[in-house]
Amino acid sequence: MRESVIYQEIEAEAEAKGKAIGIAEGKAEGKAEGIRLVAVNLLKSQMSLAQVVRVTGLSLEEAQLLQQEIEGEL
């Protein structure tokens, strides 16, 4: 009986930890996608790469890749 209670406690703790990790990962993915969308909109509005990098915090390489993607769409 005692083992069952201990198992349930461990299981509940693992579940809570898993949920916390999932939430943190979801927030990080959402933030990254939001920054990407902002960068795309800034680039489409003809903002310079240097300004996009400064505003969004993306690396120059990331901004250049986004610019190439946009130019490929046109």
Image: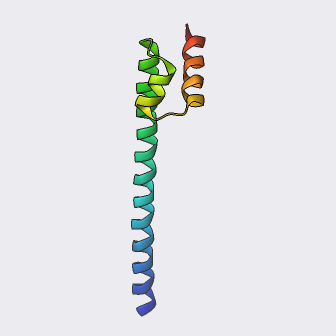
Picture residue at 41% right of the left edge, 12% below the top: 45
- Figure check: 24 above or below 56: below
Is 72 on the left-hand or right-hand side of 17?
Answer: right
Picture residue at 46% right of the left edge, 38% below the top: 32
Outermost residue on the top side: it is 74
| Percent of width and height locating residue 29 | 46, 42
* Total numbered circles: 0
- Figure check: 64 above or below 56: above
Residue 15 visible in the displayed image: yes
Quarter containing the C terminus: top right
Outermost residue on the bottom side: it is 2
Residue 1 visible in the displayed image: no
Is 65 on the left-hand or right-hand side of 13?
Answer: right
| Percent of width and height locating residue 53 | 48, 29
Picture residue at 45% right of the left edge, 13% below the top: 44
The figure's colour scheme reads rainbow
Picture residue at 40% right of the left edge, 26% below the top: 38
| Percent of width and height locating residue 1 | 41, 92
| Percent of width and height locating residue 22 | 44, 54
